[in-house]
Image (cartoon, helix red, strand yellow):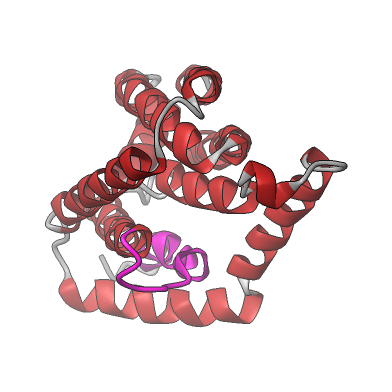
Amino acid sequence: MLGTIVNSLAIVLGCVIGLLVKGRVSQKISDTIMNGLALCVVYIGISGALKGENTLLTIICVALGALIGELIDIDKWLNNLGEKIELKVNKGKDKEKENISISQGFVSASLIFCIGAMSIVGSLQSGLTGNHETLLAKSVIDGITSIIFTATLGIGVIFSSISVFIYQGIITLGASFLSNILSDAVINSMTCVGSLLIIGLGLNILKATNIKIANLLPAVFLPIIAGILGII
């Protein structure tokens, strides 16, 4: 769990720094930075998606994942959680005046930090071999990203560190039990599907689309079932 713990703390540290510089950056600059980050998110997504080896499996996973996600409505649960946090933190404050959107910061940052290829692969490496290098590298990237995100989206980003800790922790601890089926093909398929979701998230940040990325999250883990069934 060392890599996951460091990753979560890096996000918290980045958020603290982001809060210190928040308000010193104009809205125009913040918008430009966010758009630039969104383009980087899309690039990261495309890079990871190209690692896919089975296009048909990817399509099936995304379709079934969307069905499962919509039935559960993960997006609604995440937003409700973000809004509850927002109500507690902003209690007695003028939300419009302070331009705080904790829910948006929490959900957006959680998705960006959790569904990336480095998150999945790094957690698997950490759990299977005790190699934390990927997660430590991710910690540096997430720390820098959280500074900018916090400066633009507000304090909600800091709560994404909890999401990262739980999400990556579960994958790390569960990796040892799934070591027999987590072949390179399964990991590549998970990376490909997760990267497609990252592309969608980047497009959402650019306001080009309004995809419920959270409702597609089950698709990331469906390749594991395919591995169990011997399909890949």
Q: Nearer the viewer, residue 73 or 225?
A: 73
What x and y, as percent, mark residue 51?
14, 54
Residue 184 visible from this viewpoint: no
The one of 73 and 224 positioned closer to us in this rendering? 73
Furthest residue toward right: 92
> How many marks on residues?
0
Predominant SS along the magenta part = helix
- Check if residue 66 falls in the magenta segment: no
Q: Is residue 216 magenta?
A: yes
Q: Quadrant of residue 225?
A: bottom left
At 45% across and 21% down in the image, what residue appears?
3
Residue name at image x 40 percent, y 36 percent? 26
> In this rendering, is residue 18 above or below 85?
above
Q: Residue at x 50, y 33 (%)?
A: 150
Q: Position of residue 48 (x, y in %)?
A: 19, 51
Q: Which segment is the magenta one?
A: 206-227
Foreground residue, 218 or 156? 156
Image quarter for residue 126?
Answer: top left
Please give left or right for residue 26 compared with residue 137 in the image: right
